[in-house]
Image (spheres, helix red, strand yellow):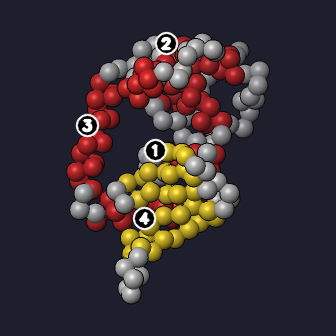
Amino acid sequence: MVTAERLREELARYGIGADIHEGDGVALVSVWVDLVVWTDGAYSYLWWTGGHFPRSSLRKYTYSPVDDPVAAARRVAARYAELRNGHSRSREVGEILTEVTESYAAKGTVRRGCWNCEPPGADTGTEEYRVRVVTEPLCAWCRILSDLRRQLVRLEPLLPEVAEEHPDLVAEAWELLAPVVPRSGLVLHRAFQVPAPA
């Protein structure tokens, strides 16, 4: 769902990772323990404030209009900060995420060839393919293209160090995107800047 993806992208600007789960006309953006944002894609983002109504003990929810993901992300980021600092399970969850991230990084990044490089028409509906998507990192080529595209829509690159290690691939990526995307006016991370031709 587009609205969930927009929120996730805006949260990434705050350095906050999130997962998206979709079904039955609703998308859930899972951010942290006790912080899941619901969106119907048409009207609003909705999440638990952490409070309860005194008489009924029902949870208090807050919302933000779906047409302003920037404001929603700012408010969700504030709630995230509260939970990171005060939730009893934050430390445990943080340790698990660190382990997963380190394990993922230890697998290394190959130069070319990953699940994302599958040719058009490849069978991507198999369980094997889904496992690859979750367990294999993008190859350097796909990572660089992905991070370059992120910057073209004014988002920060996720792993600029991959571009720093492979300047030849950065130059190739620019050659690929140059016919469609003008370079003028774009402020890119230094790892993605290609010297102008002489």
Q: Earlier in the sequence, mark 1 or mark 2?
A: 1
Residue at 61% over, 56% down: 40
Q: Which of marks 4 and 1 is nearer the N terminus?
A: 1
Instruction: Name the residue rendered at 63%, 14% in the picture.
Output: 121
Position of residue 196 measured from the top left corner of the image (x, y, whole percent): 68, 21
Residue of label 4: 79
Q: Which element carries disc 2, helix, strand or loop? A: loop
Of helix, strand and loop, which one carries label 4?
helix
Most foreground residue, 20 or 87: 20
Q: Is residue 11 visible?
A: no
Q: Name the residue under label 3.
A: 99
Task: Please name the residue that numbered disc 1 is placed on.
Answer: 19
Identity of the residue furthest to the bottom in this view: 55
Q: Which of the two residues, 63 or 8, is positioned nearer the viewer here?
A: 63
Q: Is residue 162 left or right of residue 102?
A: right
Please tell me whether residue 88 is drawn above or below residue 190 in the rendered image. Answer: below
Q: How many other residues sit within 10 Å of disc 4, few (<14), some (14-19) or many (≥20)? A: some
What amino acid is at disc 3?
Glu
Mark sitting earlier along the chain (4/2): 4
Report if the CB atoms under discs 4 and 3 are less than 8 Å apart. no
> Which quadrant of the rendered structure holds the N terminus?
top right
Taking depth in this image into account, of 74 and 126 the one nearest to the observer is: 126
Looking at the picture, does residue 109 appear above or below residue 67? above
Separation of marks 3 and 1 at Cα, in angstroms: 17 Å
Q: Name the residue carrying label 2.
A: 113
